[in-house]
Every structure is written in C-alpha cells, then in structure tokens.
Amino acid sequence: MTLFYLFGAVAVIASLLVIAQRNPIYSVLLLIAAFGALSGLYVLLDAPFVAVIQIIVYAGAIMVLFLFVVMLLNAPHEETEHDEKVHPLRRPGPMRFGAALAVALVVELLWALTRDGGEPAAFEAPAVSSVRTIGHVLFTDYAFAFEVTSLLIIAAMVGAVVLAKRDSHSGGASAPPM
Amino acid sequence: MTPLLIAQIGLTLFVFFMLLNSAAIMVYVERKVAALLQQRLGPYLVGPKGLLQPLADVIKLMFKEELRPKAADWFLFALAPIISAACAFAAFAVVPFGAQTTFFGLLKEPIKLQVADVNVAVLVIFAIASMSVYGIVLAGWSSNSKYSLLGGLRSSAQMISYELSYGLALASVLIIGNSLSLTDIVNGQSGYWFHVIPRWFIFLQPVGFLIYLTAGVAETNRAPFDFPEAEQELVAGYHTEYSSMSFAMFFLAEYINMVTVSAVATNLFLGGWHGPFLPEYLGWIWFLIKVAALLFFYVWMRWTLPRYRYDQLMTFGWKILLPLAVINLLVTAAGVLYFGV
Amino acid sequence: MPTLNDYLILSAILFAIGTAGVFVRRNLITILLSIEIMLNAVNLSFVAFGRSLGSPNGQIIVFFVMTVAAAEAAVGLAIVIGLFRHRESLNPDSFTSLKW
C-alpha cells in the first residue's frame, strides 16, 4: 500500500509540476519522472509487460522526440501577458474556464467514486498477465488491429517527415541546421 | 536478517564493486592492447607492467578542478552524468552471471547469481538502454556550447536509430529461446548436439549475433561508430565541457555499457556460464572468459577500423542493418515454425 | 492493499491535471505534454480494470493506446515545427489569422 501511495504521489506531483513549469525542458523531464512512477504502478497491478513497454515507448522514445523538438526549436520560455500573481481562476478567457473545469472534474469524479454504492472492488485471484498470454491474444483476437497499427505508424512517419520538411520556397525563418 | 537477505545484499554490493573494477581493468586493457596493436609499449611505468595505471588515472581525475561553464544550466549539467552512470549500472542488475548456488551449503536454498530475476529481463535491458540516451542529450544541451549540442544531438540520434536493430536482434533470440527471462534463455543453451557442439544460440543465429554486436557497439558509441566523440571533428562532443569526476562518470558509463552489452551477448548467444570441463558451480569462470573475449573484440575493433562519417553511419543503421535485422527475424520465425526447434 | 477505486481516483486526478494543462498553458509543446498525461491516465484505468476482471484485454488496449499516442505525438510535433517556422512563436494565441 505504501508503494501505491509513493508512486501515486510522485505521478501526481510530477504532473502538477509539468503544467506549472515555465521551462519546457523541465516539463519534459518531469513528465519522464511521472511515467516512471506510472510504470511502477503497472508493476503493482501485475502487468510487468506494460510497465516495461511504458518505459521503452513513452519514456524512451516519445519523450526523446519531445526533447529533440524542444532543443531544435530552442523553445522560449513562455511569457504570459498577465501578472503571475493573478490567480488562475481570475484570469480571463480559456484559462479561467480550464482551471474551473479541472477543479469541477476532480470534485465530480471523487464524488462518484467514493459514493457508497457497494464495497470497493478488491482485486481477485492473480491475473493472467504473462507475456505469452498477451502475445497469444494479441495475435489471434486482435490480429487485425495489430496490422492496422502498422499502417498507422507508416502514415504517421510519412506525415511527420512531410510536415517537418523545410520547403525551399518558404520565406520564413528555418530551424537551425543539424 | 535472514542469511538469504544478507546473501542478496552482499551479491548486490559485489556486482556493483565488480562493475567498478571492470571499468578500471578496461581502461588498462584498452591502453595496453592498443599499444601492442600499434607496436609500442603502452603504460609500463606505474606499477609492474603498468598495472597500477588505472589507479593513477582515477587519482588524477579526482584532483582535477571541477569546472562549470557559467552559461550552463547547472541542474541539468550536474544531472546528465548521473543519469548516464546510473543507467549503465542499472542495466547490469538483471544479467545473470552464474548458475544457482548455495555458497557451499551456507544457505538453505540456492540463490541465483543475479541481482534481480525479473521474468521480462530482456525487455528491462532494452528499456534501460533507451533511458541512457537522456544522459547524453542533456549533457549536450546543458553545456550551452555548440560542439556539445551538435555532439549530443548526433549521438542520441545515432543511439535511437540503432536501438531498432538491437531490439529486432533480441526478438530473434526470443523466438528461439522461448522466454524473456535471461536465466531461462541461458539454461536453454545447456547440453550438446552430437556430444561435441554446444547448444549455443550463435550456431542457430549467426547473423543475429553479428547484428546484435554491431548495434551494441553503436549503442555504446564506440568505434567505428564514435563520430560524436571524435576528437578531430567535434572537440569531444557532448562531454567537451565536463572535467574531473563528471567526465569520469561518462567514461565509467561507457565502459560499463560495453561490459553490459558483452554480458548480455554472452548470455543470449554464447551460452552464458555453460562450458566444458568445469562443474556447474564454477560456471562464472566461463562467463568471465566469454565476456573478456567479447571485450577484447571491442577494443580490437576500435583500434583497427576507421570511423564512419555521420551520414554513412546513419545510412548503415537505417538502410542496411535494419532491413537485415527484419529479414533475420522473419527467417528465424519461419525456421522455428518449420523445424519446430 | 489498494482497491480498484484507489487506482480509478488516481487516474481521475491525473486526467484532470492533463485537462487543466491543455487549457491553462500557452505553449504548444506543453499542451501536447498535457495530452500525453491524459492518455496515460486512461492507460492506468484500463490496466486497473483489466486486472480486476482478470483479463489480458486491458493490457492489450494499452498497447494500442501507446501506439496511437506515439503516432499522434510525432505528427503533432511535426506540425508544431511547421508552425514555429512561420511565426517564430510557440504561443497558440499568435496563430489567430483565421479569426474573424
């Protein structure tokens, strides 16, 4: 139980700091810490495969991509026109809406989940979670989705290359050469 | 404080200590072997045959001034070598180096000679290898100097490109080995065919072994793939601005990554600790011999081959090694299905 | 022992944090990071439900969600690079030329 609280606290605090940081590089690094905590939670849920895949794919590949883009664009620190001392709930426009929405969401979900509708569902007997089972189900029941995923990845690859390519006719500034 | 717990903690500390020692030994071996390959003597003054040279190096590094460029982002600058070194050590935690032993009957039940026996060990090694990219990227970025940034970005792009072939070579071994746990894969390589040829996976997967080693060399940024740290090109790449113990940590991380890649290659392809003439509980001697052979191969390659230029390196990684790894995987899968190995 | 409810509450909190991030932050990359937080919160509830029902389907759906998140992050970042080249800014408020 203490491990659950520890990982949960790290995940929540890291996520809060991600959205509160000014410097985008620190945001990316804090999100990696949050992913690490989530990976620990998956291990607690008897899902070691998903835990390791989370580190390999999310923390090891997607975040590297984010970090590259932040470094390539030399992402500036975000400046806000508003004084930082103004409370988020008082800033006009989408910020007020967003902050209010988030608070409302948390309150509502907490209410729904802690209602006394029945006893909290405890976890049953050990789950089937070996990689062998997952692989078997993945390649038989979900084989079509698996193949379609490969098409999705190719589409994303081609899209990313085409969108990020520098056109020779553009008059705007271009990213620094590698 | 049961004896099992004490043994486990002792094992962890032992592995940590031996990894540090292996880095020191590698420093000496590299210089001596390089010298002998180049027909000169190498270190011979410090201690008998120069054996205390690594000690002298460590003392020198400790006494150097720890510089920090003023424009550097101090937190990331300090964090980067820590990430590199920590990931290098952590990857070795799931590598077994010997059979189960009871330490001559001191323990009631045998413990495995492995810090943590995870049943997804191969994936854990891959995960930690992909985390070690961050040490380099952050080092390049936080130094706030153009050589470091270019070196860091190039080096990390190289590492993530070769991770694909690395993973596919691992997948090919998994198809034959039938398990993700390194202990099970090694135990699947015990025994002999025709009483003569050991059942190592290298005989079933020669191409896979070569792909794995090539990708491993590229992952650890060693020659001939060490363009990002080439002195002639980028001063020293991502560790230009580091000195003293931070530099030592990068160095340490590089050598320990080499040892981990060699150890995993030994476990996956060369039969781990199984070997003739020695009883099972002395299997770690064979393990050491095989790892030492692979490390010698690493050093030999560095001082023999010229280095790849960066675009040649990336072309090789994406256009030659990756298709080869995919074809290897397909052929392995077809072979296992057909022959039912 | 943590119950299913505990995991769901944690997932709800993370999802709310992600939502707040999308609305409150004025930096395109941080918005994309908040979307990743939301996707991870959903992954956590999938795995928790999969575990409580004793089926591997939860983990398999997580596998697919991760793939989709990777593809979306790649394309999203490519778009961000293209936008940055135009306006030299990552603030979504500066891309307002289609407003009436």
Image (cartoon, coloured by chain):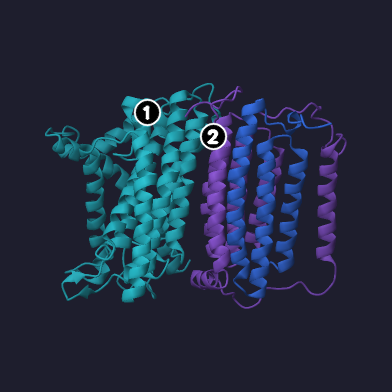
In-image side of B54 versus A7 (left or right):
left
User: Distance between the Cα atoms at labels 2 and 1?
Assistant: 30 Å
Q: Residue at x 24, y 66 (%)?
A: B282
Query: Would residue A157 be seen by someone viewing this image from the given angle?
Result: yes
Same chain for marks 2 and 1?
Answer: no
The chain letter under disc 2 is A
Chain shown in purple: A
Residue C13, image quadrant: bottom right
Q: Quadrant of the C terminus of chain B?
A: bottom left
Whether residue A133 is situated above or below residue B245 in the rendered picture? below
The residue positioned 62% from the left and 60% from the top of the image is A3
Pick the residue in front: B218 or A118. B218
Query: Is residue C44 depicted above or below A104 in this figure?
Result: below
Residue B5's x, y, as percent? 45, 65
Chain letter of disc 1? Answer: B
Residue indicated by mark 1: B236
Residue type marked 2 = Lys
User: What number is the disc on residue A165?
Assistant: 2
Q: Which chain is cyan?
A: B
The percent coordinates of residue A141 (x first, y second) are 57, 73
Q: Nearer the viewer, residue B1 or C23?
A: C23
The chain coloured blue is C
Q: Residues within 10 Å of mark 1 (few under 14, many from 20)?
A: some
Disc 2, SS? loop
Residue A79: which numbered mark, if any?
none
